[in-house]
């Protein structure tokens, strides 16, 4: 298939999925509920939303500095400016197609800083490994902090409706536990019986190679010069991600009294939405709405807030990404002329 046609199809599919999620959420709303969402967004305090933009830019700049530390372990000395431009152009490209951003930013380093593509791409994998580990830690921390709220939500919105629809008289959570254990046992038996065929499967090999790449990525962190600074950058990046969502809470009265625990829940569950659908379009606001129900925020206000958070983050990427695309060749040409 023609690569351009393939990319157009992939972009259309991801955009279509996002539009589908928007339609699913809005389909069953009344005209009054839709008007309530519009009213909440129209009357939001956009000064708070504007505050999220510099926080986002700072997080991306720290990511560029952290990435530079990984590049330097291989003996290269790229400039901070080009690292930042590469990161922002990568984020901008990722809005269109998954993984295009990783390729884009490594290509930029090859062109402007003479860093071999394969070497810089290896550092991107290392970054992904580290961020995935941080996300997993935050995910379980969030579950621990929100255990009571999540348990009540699941019981009221999943278990009880299923019990009433299926007319079950026994404990559905107990049945679910038995089902999961049975699935694990059956899966284990099937794996032992067909392990040779499974391990020879291309999909299994791809997963195995990805896991090995994660391990190698973690090992490469040993070579980082100032490890404390590297992990400080990592901590600061994720803290800024949290604050980017949290400050937007103050733009709507219904969410202005929420604490950082609610911000952590939005960060974790919202990140899952971004993983599921490219850029989180459509699904991110819906996840925010459902998450904030746990904190007593009405669904319509939560949905409006979700769109405000998503828009502030993506407007930052689009604007700074376009500026980076323009400045990257101009500033580097001037540098070469001076040299």
Image (cartoon, grey):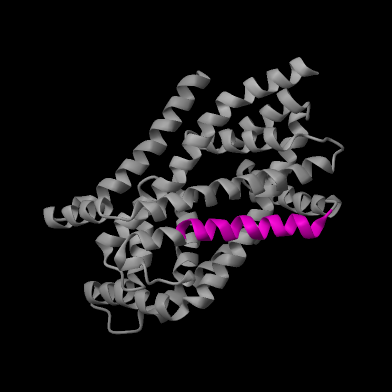
Q: Is residue 242 magenta?
A: yes
Q: Could you tell me which residue is drawn at 79 percent across and 60 percent down?
A: 228
**What residue do we see at 31% from left, 73% from top?**
296
Write down the quadrant of residue 237 in the picture.
bottom right
Is there any visible trace of residue 325 in the rendered image?
Answer: yes
- Counting from the top left corner in percent of width and height, residue 264 is at 50, 66
Q: Residue at x 44, y 41 (%)?
A: 315
Range shown magenta: 226-245
Q: Nearer the viewer, residue 269 or 228?
A: 228
Q: Is residue 311 left or right of residue 333?
A: left
User: Magenta part mainly helix, strand or loop?
Assistant: helix
The residue drawn where x is 85% and y is 51% is 225
Q: Is residue 181 above or below residue 200?
A: below
Query: x and y percent of residue 48 in the render?
Result: 40, 56
Q: Is residue 24 left or right of residue 93?
A: left
Q: Which quarter of the figure has residue 44?
A: bottom left
Q: Is residue 274 left or right of residue 130?
A: left
Quadrant of the drawing holding the C terminus: top right
Q: Given the current orientation, which residue lies at the most extreme top position?
A: 337
Residue 193 visible? The answer is no
Q: Is residue 194 magenta?
A: no
């Amino acid at each position: 298939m023609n690569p351009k046609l393939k990319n157009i199809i992939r972009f259309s599919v991801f955009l279509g999925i996002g539009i589908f999620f928007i339609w699913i959420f809005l389909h069953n709303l009344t005209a009054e509920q839709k008007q309530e969402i519009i009213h909440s967004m129209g009357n939001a305090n956009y000064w708070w939303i504007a505050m999220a933009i510099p926080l986002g830019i700072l997080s991306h700049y720290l990511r560029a500095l952290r990435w530079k530390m990984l590049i330097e372990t291989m003996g290269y000395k790229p400039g901070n400016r080009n690292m930042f431009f590469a990161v922002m152009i990568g984020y901008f490209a990722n809005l269109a197609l998954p993984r295009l951003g990783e390729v884009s930013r490594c290509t930029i380093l090859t062109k402007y800083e003479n860093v071999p593509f394969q070497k810089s791409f290896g550092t991107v994998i290392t970054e992904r490994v580290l961020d995935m580990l941080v996300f997993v830690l935050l995910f379980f921390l969030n579950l621990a902090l929100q255990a009571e709220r999540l348990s009540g939500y699941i019981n009221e919105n999943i278990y009880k409706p299923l019990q009433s629809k299926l007319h079950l008289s026994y404990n559905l959570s107990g049945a679910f536990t038995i089902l999961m254990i049975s699935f694990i046992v059956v899966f284990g038996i099937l794996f032992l019986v067909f392990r040779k065929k499974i391990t020879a499967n291309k999909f299994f090999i791809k997963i195995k190679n990805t896991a090995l790449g994660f391990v190698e990525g973690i090992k490469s962190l040993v070579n980082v010069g100032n490890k404390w600074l590297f992990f400080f950058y990592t901590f600061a990046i994720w803290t800024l991600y949290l604050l980017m969502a949290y400050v937007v809470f103050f733009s709507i009265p219904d969410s202005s009294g929420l604490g950082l625990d609610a911000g952590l829940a939005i960060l974790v569950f919202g990140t899952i939405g971004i993983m599921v659908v490219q850029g989180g379009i459509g699904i991110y606001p819906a996840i925010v709405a459902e998450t904030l129900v746990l904190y007593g925020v009405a669904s319509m206000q939560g949905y409006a807030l979700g769109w405000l958070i998503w828009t502030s983050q993506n407007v930052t990427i689009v604007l700074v990404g376009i500026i980076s695309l323009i400045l990257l060749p101009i500033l580097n040409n001037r540098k070469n002329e001076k040299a």
